[in-house]
Image (cartoon, rainbow, N blue to C red):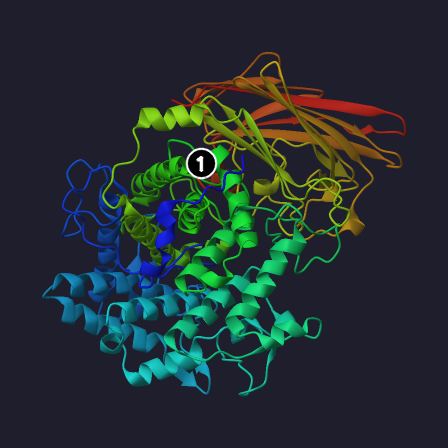
Amino acid sequence: MHRQKKSALAIAFGTLSALFIGGCGGSNSTGTTATTPPPPAMAANSLQAIVYGASDTSVPAGAGVPITMMGQMRALFDLIKKSPDFTQVVMDLGDGSPVHVLDTNTGDKFLPGKLALGLSYILIDMKTRGDPNYADYLATYQKITAAMITQTSGTNYLYANTSWGEYYYLVTLNNLKAHGMLNEVFSDAMLATLQNRLTFCDMFGADGSGKTNTCPAAGVPIDIASLNTAQNYYAVSYGIAGLRQKLGWSNPTFASATDPAVATMGARDALLYTLTKHIRNDSSGGFSDEASNTHTTYYDQARFDRYSTLLIGEVVERSIEMDNLANLTPELKGYLRKSVDLILPQLNTDGQGFNYGRSIGPYGDSAFVEILTAAANAGVLSQQEMQIAYSFIYKSAYRFDTFWYDPTLPTPSVNMWVKGRGTDSYRGKPRVMGENFSLLHQYMYVNAWWNKLGFGGNAPMADTDFKTWLAALPHYTLTWYNVPGDTAHPYSAALITVRDGKRVINLNLSQAPDYNSYTPYYPVPVSDKLTYGTTDLGYALLIPQVSYNGKTYIPVTYYKNLSVQESNGQVVVSFDTTRFRQAVKNATYTTDIDLQAHTVLTFAQGTITRTDTLSSGTLAGNIAIETDFTSFADFQSTTANGDGVSVTYANSSATSYGTTGFDNCALSNFDMAGGVTNPLSTTPIGQLHSNFACKTNPFALSVGTSRTFSWSLKYADLS
């Protein structure tokens, strides 16, 4: 499935110079001008109706959402505006610990940029519509942005604003310039300060604290290999350099001890050149290896997740936003098409995106949205795929407004933190204000692009047609991150997607050296409201977890001999795990134990079965095995069966679960521990309520022997 027919709708790049797009790091957003008022004929079930709404940004009749995204952004602006001291603005999510979301200690080092960009949507819209309150809101905007960019001493600033925050700010400046508002909103002195501060220098050869500007003296190049953060931040730097260039601001230059060609390029093109090499060299399958910069051997490489697929979408969109189309090469478009081919088999009628890896939840959904939008703009979608993409994006926006956004919270907000939900510590609750801005921004820029592509105000394709297209997708899809036979990447890394009726099931095999001790990176099936990992935490979720000499070991890397076959309507996946890793973050291969597993997963209609056969050539002493299944079903609706090895569920997607090979099993309440919420139970999409833990007594696994364990999970189809 590698369609690359160029869409006629994507040829109009030359007319899009006023539309700016980018990525949202730490989050994964992308920038643009404010969304436009609705066209004369706007369908209630359109992307424009959800994002912008009626001419006053209210919800159009029949749209079925509690508030438009412009309405959400205006509410955030009003929340800030009504506070005498914006640093004391509080958001209350109803969990008993309200957060001061605009103080200097939120941990969100992108906050000034997010705030400048998010609130600028309201300014641009008010100015465009001639709103009489514009001057009042402009004064508030100027007060906040000036305070946040204030120097406290030397080159230190009151608020950190690193990398993505600098990028957001530059998107803001370009958007305001496109609307003839730049010099009205920012004084010459403020622009001079921003020109000095909004650089990529903090990402190279410095501590990355964001408190200082570390650009070298004029004429002194930066070593392009001195990036002090993950390699995907070359893309952030690329966005910054390109948007500075578009404003007419100069950039520091780069040099490379190993590649003299870099010194002959401007910063923008040197960064794109380096980023392209990262994608090309660190994964033979064309995806970005998110662990390759800090892990130097094949033992430690190969973290493939949401961002591995999204990064190329951001690169393409930035190339368009900065008018760098000459460097939007067939190679880059080919990588983008691979990302499209990975996500098309996962599309669904609920607007859900990535369900494995880190930083998912609403960002998992919006990543699909961003990739499809980049592909539409780059001309790598067929005409039918354009319709499919727009229909999915509409459903994703509807899901954001009706699932992720919670108007019943004391302070209405996107919810990734309460009511049973949990997200990465990186996106801790103190960052709630910035996360609202990031996510709203993503859908606003995407809506603006689809308006430009001729879909403004259009209804998506009929649900019956969308479902017919989905039903025709392959039963399974195998996407290799590392092509078999690649000696530089000898372990199997791939995504297997299985479709069973309306249900999408993903099995992601990724080494993930820095995250493989966490359940979202386990080699287990993941599917909505059926099986789901818990961010930043690990336990024996559907894997044979080993206790040995007082330590815990798990089969979460070193995959070999991956095979995927379909027979008699069943998809059979098998692979070998050659060593078990200690279940701690950033475990090195020196702590591995000599234990192997041959794993077979069988996907049949309404049933998933896994068997693990364990063996070892040298392991001495006894080991014990545990495997857990945690369910979204209410504990009160869950029954342990009399056989002692199986359980029955009611009122949930899971209907039954059973095991073989274990000595004892126990059902327990999972959502509470010691009178407080069990952190293991809070997944990105909601709370797990029960755990069925099966264990063995200690046993010896001598040379030439093996022991097999299995589980079988039955489930109902999605309605």
Q: Name the residue furthest top.
A: 642
The answer to whether 222 is drawn above or below residue 459 in the figure is: below
Q: Is residue 653 left or right of residue 103?
A: right
The residue that disc 1 covers is 687
Which residue is at 76% across, 44% downward? 490
The answer to whether 148 is drawn above or below residue 62 in the figure is: below
Mark 1 residue element? strand
As rendered, which of 712 and 455 lies closer to the eye? 455
Q: Name the residue furthest left.
A: 132
Q: How many labels, in total?
A: 1
- Quadrant of the rendered image containing residue 702: top right
Q: Is residue 60 left or right of residue 186?
A: left
As rendered, which of 631 and 699 lies closer to the eye? 631
User: Would residue 32 be seen by someone viewing this image from the given angle?
Assistant: no
Q: Is residue 92 left or right of residue 329?
A: left
Q: Amino acid at mark 1?
A: Gln
User: Would residue 520 be seen by someone viewing this image from the given angle?
Assistant: yes
Which residue is at 52% across, 46% downward? 306
Q: Position of residue 559 (x, y in %)?
A: 72, 38
As rendered, which of 163 and 414 lies closer to the eye? 163
As rendered, which of 680 and 220 lies closer to the eye? 220
Which residue is at 71% across, 28% downward? 599
Q: Position of residue 201 (x, y in %)?
A: 53, 76
Which residue is at 52% across, 53% downward? 312
- Quadrant of the rendered image containing residue 50: top left
Q: Position of residue 249 (x, y in %)?
A: 41, 79
Which quadrant of the rendered structure holds the C terminus?
top left
Q: Position of residue 685 (x, y in %)?
A: 43, 38
